[in-house]
Image: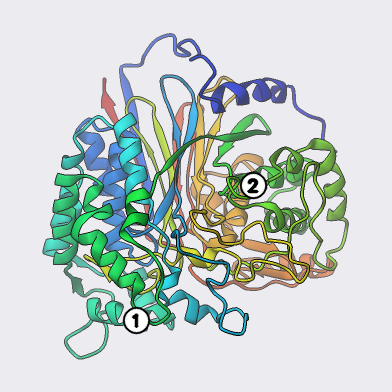
């Protein structure tokens, strides 16, 4: 066990003030303001990055820019996120130093039952059946969440934030190589009628990278969204079309206009814990932030920081800690409004110390979930969470920071479209089997109004003085925790520049699976892992989509995942 650094005591105290809105605002932490300041954007598509920067150049806030970025991503990266999906935003207030979370996770319609994804014989539907069904769509949350955050943190008029995306939809944009790759893939959604009609080429096939794609329906919707606010989606003609689209076969859902009208985003306290000299703040359940903090606690008990990316033992420790974390996360984390999530127990130092002993020297069978203090018996998890999603980070000239992960779940959601955007398939993030053979409910079982468990963990890091120190987040379904964990270890423990940290190979260890980018690891690493019982297999899906920012000695160090098409740009302006 490594000796706890003195800064941890300060960070534990800082956690209370940073993450609890009831604590009084601390005094100004900056003695004098510099003559110049920076704002920055890191996003997975250059058009989205530019849309955010354009807002910041006009004096907009980080939340203003987030609205513009989401509007653009819904158009140019529709396989990942959109107006028909949900999101978590972790927000740092540059004036007060507080960190809060805006929860825009989708909710289950009021008419759902435990048999949501069961056939007439009580057996789970196949994933292709489920994902293409009308039942797969949850009540979208991203737009109302952004509207809530904008009311509290916005500077520019809501109506002024959609111009770039509206113009790009009307005039068209060039399909990027990455979007073109998914259009040529074998995902079931790409064969859905709406998707095929939207991406149809003149030769009867689908458009490809380099082709121009117009979306006049989306341009018209954005015009109404700018003028009407979130009611443009949650009421009126768009809401009616969402209901009709989700209730249609095959396997129609139960969403109603009342479900859309009743949706409410939630402002939550962030969940914060120390790692090295930083305080790491993440969303609480239904996000998996508690699992990520447990992963950091496990890693801090190893010597991973002293080893480095060229040492197979470092990757072994990361893999084993990941397996332990996922075992606990999968068993216990769900929507805390519906199921008891033992947050304190999962992060109890004595419990983590016992779990750390399972890391061992050789990888064996999958570790079982532990029994953290305060845990109730829960069924084993049967959630099949595919890869998807996108992440972006924004810092404005006032020091406010947004770290936001946003999604329509799997590739192109359900493949069903309304007004130029795809509808999410977020209900497939619930466990397909709601109970075990003894009748015990899974923590992530479906229920009316419940939010499915999410692996999205947009995080913000503070230094020991409470200043913003960094932000990270990723796409990738249940692999998000591993992608972000690897990137944080590389940037913090191994002190790599952020771009190099994100470019390191990914390794995802969960249950009996060890997946990784085997062509990017050296033979020495692969051989060393094999000698320790780990034989990597190729990963799948969208891979990672990490965006990362750190402030090192006052200097911006931002990076974008080279597996995508992003940009991380900072600009300096005079105050």
**471 and 251: which is toward the camera:** 251
Q: Residues within 10 Å of mark 1 (few under 14, many from 20)?
A: some
Q: In the rendered image, which quarter is residue 317 located in?
A: bottom right
Q: Residue 301: image x %, image y %?
A: 80, 41
Identify which residue is drawn at 38% across, 64% down. 255
Identify whether 233 is placed above or below 91.
Answer: below
Q: Which mark is residue 292?
A: 2
Counting from the top left corner in percent of width and height, residue 260 is at 34, 55
Q: Position of residue 491 (x, y in %)?
A: 58, 43
Look at the image and tell me whether residue 51 can be seen: yes
Residue 555 vs 511, above or below: the answer is: above
Q: Nearer the viewer, mark 2 or mark 1?
A: 1
For mark 1, give the secondary structure: loop
Could you say which is closer to the camera, residue 67 or residue 392?
67
Q: Is residue 349 left or right of residue 81?
A: right
Give percent across and percent down for residue 48.
29, 52
Identify the image quadrant of residue 218: bottom left
Closer to the chain start, of discs 2 and 1, is 1
**Residue 505 seen anywhere in this rendered image of the structure:** no
At a point 48% along the width and 15% down the height, the residue shown is: 25
Nearest to the observer: residue 76 or residue 253: 253
């Amino acid at each position: 066990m490594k000796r706890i650094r003195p800064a941890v005591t300060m960070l534990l105290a800082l956690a209370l003030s940073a993450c609890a809105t009831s604590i009084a605002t601390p005094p100004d932490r900056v003695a004098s303001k510099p003559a110049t300041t920076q704002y920055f954007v890191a996003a997975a598509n250059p058009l989205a990055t530019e849309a955010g920067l354009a807002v910041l150049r006009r004096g907009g806030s980080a939340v203003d820019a987030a609205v513009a970025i989401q509007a653009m991503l819904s158009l140019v990266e529709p396989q990942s996120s959109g107006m028909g999906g949900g999101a978590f935003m972790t927000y740092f207030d540059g004036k007060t130093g507080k960190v809060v979370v805006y929860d825009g996770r989708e909710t289950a319609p009021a008419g759902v039952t435990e048999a949501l994804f069961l056939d007439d014989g009580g057996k789970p539907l196949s994933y292709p059946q489920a994902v293409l069904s009308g039942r797969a769509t949850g009540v979208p949350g991203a737009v109302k969440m952004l509207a809530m955050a904008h009311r509290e943190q916005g500077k520019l008029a809501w109506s002024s934030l959609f111009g770039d995306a509206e113009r790009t939809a009307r005039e068209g944009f060039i399909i990027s190589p990455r979007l073109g790759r998914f259009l040529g893939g074998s995902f079931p959604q790409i064969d859905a009628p709406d998707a095929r009609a939207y991406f149809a080429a003149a030769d009867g096939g689908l458009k490809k990278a380099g082709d121009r794609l117009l979306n006049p329906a989306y341009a018209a919707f954005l015009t109404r969204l700018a003028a009407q606010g979130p009611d443009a989606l949650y009421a009126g003609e768009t809401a009616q079309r969402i209901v009709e689209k989700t209730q249609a076969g095959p396997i129609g859902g139960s969403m109603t206009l009342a479900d859309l009208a009743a949706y409410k985003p939630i402002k939550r306290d962030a969940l914060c814990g120390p790692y090295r000299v930083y305080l790491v703040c993440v969303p609480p359940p239904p996000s998996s932030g508690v699992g990520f903090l447990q992963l950091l606690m496990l890693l801090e008990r190893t010597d991973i920081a002293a080893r480095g990316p060229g040492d197979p033992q470092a990757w072994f420790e990361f893999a084993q800690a990941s397996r332990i974390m996922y075992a606990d996360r999968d068993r216990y984390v769900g929507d805390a409004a519906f199921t008891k999530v033992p947050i304190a127990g999962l992060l109890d130092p004595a419990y983590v110390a016992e779990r750390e002993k399972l890391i061992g020297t050789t990888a064996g069978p999958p570790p079982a979930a532990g029994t953290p203090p305060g845990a109730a018996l829960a069924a084993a998890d049967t959630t099949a969470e595919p890869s998807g999603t996108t992440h972006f980070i924004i810092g404005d000239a006032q020091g406010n920071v947004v770290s936001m992960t946003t999604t329509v779940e799997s590739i192109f959601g359900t493949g069903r479209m309304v007004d130029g955007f795809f509808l999410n398939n977020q209900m497939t993030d619930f466990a397909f089997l709601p109970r075990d053979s003894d009748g015990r409910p899974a923590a992530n079982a479906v229920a009316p109004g419940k939010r499915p468990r999410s692996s999205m963990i947009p995080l913000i890091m503070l230094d020991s003085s409470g200043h913003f120190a960094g932000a990270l987040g990723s796409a990738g379904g249940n692999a998000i925790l591993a992608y972000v964990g690897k990137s944080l270890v590389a940037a913090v423990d191994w002190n790599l520049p952020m771009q190099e940290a994100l470019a390191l190979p990914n390794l995802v260890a969960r249950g009996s699976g060890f997946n990784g980018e085997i062509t990017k690891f050296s033979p020495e690493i692969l051989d060393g892992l094999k000698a320790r019982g780990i034989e990597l297999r190729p990963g799948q899906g969208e891979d990672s989509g990490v965006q990362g920012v750190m402030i090192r000695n006052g200097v911006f160090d931002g990076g974008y995942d080279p597996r995508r098409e992003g940009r991380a740009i900072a600009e300096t302006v005079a105050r």
